[in-house]
Amino acid sequence: QVQLVESGGGLVQPGGSLRLSCAASGSVSTIISMGWYRQPPGKQRELVASITFGGTTNYADSVKGRFTMSRNNAKKTLYLQMNSLKVEDTAVYYCNTVPQNKDSWGQGTQVTVSS
């Protein structure tokens, strides 16, 4: 079982930046791919970025070129650098395995982009 704790969210103006972190504990040694998911208000949760154990990343078209995902395997930590934020990036952001593990969802971290 993997436990995940997200942090780093907040309120930012359009065009601003935030860096999210996700600390993992538990049975992380068998995890191959991890992802950042988000759930905008009133919408379904979606995968926005993923990274393999070796560091290969993939991004949703909506965030490509603006978001960068990275991982520190020694520290068991994921990061999501978010630049040029838009109002439509407002959501609760979560980390989880890819494919997602329903028992590993954390509390998420709120990102609000507003002027």
Image (cartoon, grey):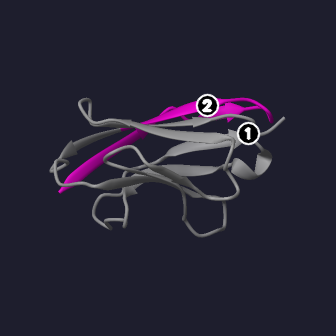
Residue beneath disc 2: 18
Image location (x, y in percent) of residue 81: 57, 34
Amino acid of disc 1: Leu
Q: Residues within 10 Å of mark 1 (few under 14, many from 20)?
A: many
Amino acid identity at mark 2 = Leu
| Residue 60 relative to residue 76: left or right | right
Q: Main secondary structure of the magenta part?
A: strand
The magenta stretch spans residue 3: yes
Residue at image point 80% right, 36% down: 14
| Image quadrant in which the N terminus is located | bottom left
Could you say whether the residue bearing mark 1 is in a helix, strand or loop?
Answer: loop
Q: Position of residue 19 (x, y in %)?
A: 55, 31
Q: Are marks 2 and 1 in contact (CB under 8 Å)?
A: yes
Residue 23 location, quadrant? top left
The part of the chain drawn in magenta is: 1-22
* Residue occupying the point 39% across, 43% down: 55
Question: Mark 2: few, some, or many residues within 10 Å (few <14, many ≥20)?
Answer: some
Residue under pointer 1: 85
Please say whether residue 43 is one of the residues in the magenta stretch. no
Q: Quadrant of the C terminus?
A: top right
Residue at disc 2, secondary structure: strand
State the separation of the CA atoms marked 2 and 1.
Answer: 8 Å
